[in-house]
Image (cartoon, rainbow, N blue to C red):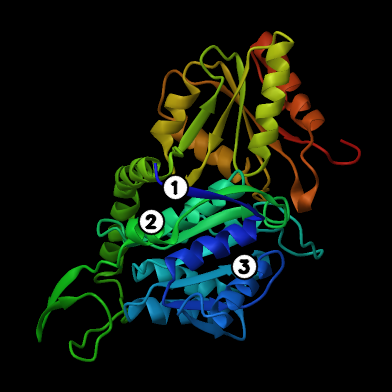
């Protein structure tokens, strides 16, 4: 483990500091709450000469992703950040970034989508982008935000992956809350990320790197009709499926460097658990706190933290859950018109073909930044305990914390 420095950073500052240490070639910036601190702080690094990034103040989030696509396609390391409606405005180009297999890194300060207008946290923006072909990492605290913002470059640029990465942090809960963060030295970060590698291709002018280069002209993103479109989509499918193996290798290497271990799925007190919750983001810290309280009261409670949402680590989740008879899926998102929340649907699909499977109950919490309190989490566990005793989930979907519920 290398030398590290303890700093007080909020989540946005942790992203900006990690990105400064990577020193990408291009940062495309447009402000939107609660992400703005990231690009503001990075602009200060540029103005103070601490990085040599080209800082492009664009006119919209659509332009921010367009700028990132152009820069990455030309061979640059490109970074941007957004939230909520900003991600929605990027929509067209977000798909293009992954379809062109561009290793862009983007921080997403998760925030509710309008209307009514709300600037606080839930996961509706990230879940809305779950099928865009991006890798998605959800962070519990600012330390994870910092570490993921470094690891993301190695993941995105891996020659067997070559896909963009979203580092997701809960708006305000993490983005604006100061925490102790252990930071690496600049030289160690730069050694870890190295230089951007390129796939070698052969064109009509010989062999070269897969990037836009006037000395070796090639076309990226041409018209792709029914003759080859499907096949090119399958390349993305294969890359995401294979990414699970390579992300684990990068996690292992980062542990050797930093001493901090990250897994796709992190079980907590699950060895003998009889009831458990699974969730993502900042609320899992509160769930752990409640699990400890319940254990002291004699309740065999456990929890599973999901860190990697895309690619979805189905087998890792099932291994972490083990033989627990009932699982509650707790999520900060509604999938309107669907039978369950997005994470719940993924987990139901993972278990669909299995003969042995736990009972499942769905809990939606924290929309629009409503605090996910220990009392709310206890309510979910109480419901699971009752269902486990009765051998049946009476209420499949529960909205916790809503007036009148």
- Asked if the residue under mark 3 is in contact with the one under mark 1, i.e. CB atoms within 8 Å, the reply is no
Q: Is residue 169 left or right of residue 230?
A: right
From the image, tell me which residue sits under label 2: 188
Sort mark 2 into few (<14), some (14-19) or many (20+) by Cα contacts within 10 Å.
some
- Who comes first in sequence, dot 2 or dot 3? 3
From the image, tell me which residue sits under label 3: 38
Could you say which is closer to the camera, residue 404 or residue 225?
Answer: 404
State the SS at label 1: loop
Cα distance between the residues tagged 1 and 2? 9 Å
| Whether residue 109 can be seen here | no
What's the mark number on residue 25? none
- Who comes first in sequence, dot 1 or dot 2? 1
From the image, tell me which residue sits under label 1: 3
> Could you say where residue 311 lies in the image, as x and y percent from the top left?
41, 48
- Asked if the residue under mark 2 is in contact with the one under mark 1, i.e. CB atoms within 8 Å, the reply is yes
Sort mark 1 into few (<14), some (14-19) or many (20+) by Cα contacts within 10 Å.
few
Choose mark 2 or mark 3, whichever is in front.
Answer: 2
- Asked if the residue under mark 3 is in contact with the one under mark 2, i.e. CB atoms within 8 Å, the reply is no
- Who comes first in sequence, dot 1 or dot 3? 1
Cα distance between the residues tagged 2 and 3? 22 Å
């Amino acid at each position: 483990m290398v030398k590290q420095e303890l700093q007080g950073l909020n989540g946005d500052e942790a992203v900006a500091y990690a990105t400064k240490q990577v020193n990408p070639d291009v940062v495309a910036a447009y402000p939107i709450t609660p992400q703005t601190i990231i690009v503001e702080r990075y602009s200060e690094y540029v103005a103070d000469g601490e990085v040599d990034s080209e800082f492009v103040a664009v006119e919209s989030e659509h332009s921010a992703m367009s700028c990132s696509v152009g820069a990455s396609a030309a061979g640059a390391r490109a970074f941007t950040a957004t939230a909520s409606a900003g991600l929605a405005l990027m929509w067209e180009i977000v798909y293009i970034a992954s379809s062109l297999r561009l290793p862009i890194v983007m921080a997403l300060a998760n925030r509710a989508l309008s209307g009514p207008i709300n600037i606080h946290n839930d996961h509706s923006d990230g879940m809305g982008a779950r099928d865009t072909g991006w890798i998605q990492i959800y962070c519990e605290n600012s330390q994870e935000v910092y570490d993921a913002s470094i690891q993301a470059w190695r993941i995105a640029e891996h020659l067997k992956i070559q896909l963009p990465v979203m580092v997701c942090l809960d708006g305000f809960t993490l983005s604006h809350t100061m925490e102790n963060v252990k930071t690496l030295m600049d030289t160690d970060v730069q050694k870890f990320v190295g230089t951007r590698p390129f796939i070698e291709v052969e064109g009509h002018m010989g062999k070269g790197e897969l990037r836009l280069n006037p000395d070796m002209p090639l076309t990226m993103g041409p018209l792709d009709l029914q003759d080859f479109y499907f096949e090119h989509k399958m390349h993305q499918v294969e890359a995401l499926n294979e990414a699970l193996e390579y992300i684990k290798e990068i996690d292992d290497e980062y542990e050797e460097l930093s001493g901090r271990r990250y897994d796709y799925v992190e079980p907590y007190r699950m060895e003998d658990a009889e009831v458990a919750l699974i969730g993502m983001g900042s609320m899992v810290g509160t769930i752990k706190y409640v699990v400890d309280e319940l254990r002291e009261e004699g309740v065999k409670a456990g929890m599973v933290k999901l860190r990697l949402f895309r690619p979805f680590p189905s087998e890792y989740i099932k291994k972490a859950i083990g033989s627990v008879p009932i699982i509650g899926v707790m999520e900060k998102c509604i999938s309107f018109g669907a039978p369950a929340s997005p994470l719940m649907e993924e987990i139901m699909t993972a278990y669909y073909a299995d003969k042995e499977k736990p009972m499942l109950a769905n809990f939606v919490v924290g929309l629009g930044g409503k605090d996910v309190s220990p009392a709310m989490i206890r309510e979910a566990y109480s419901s699971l305990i009752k269902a486990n005793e009765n051998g049946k989930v009476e209420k499949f979907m529960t909205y916790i914390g809503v007036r009148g519920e």
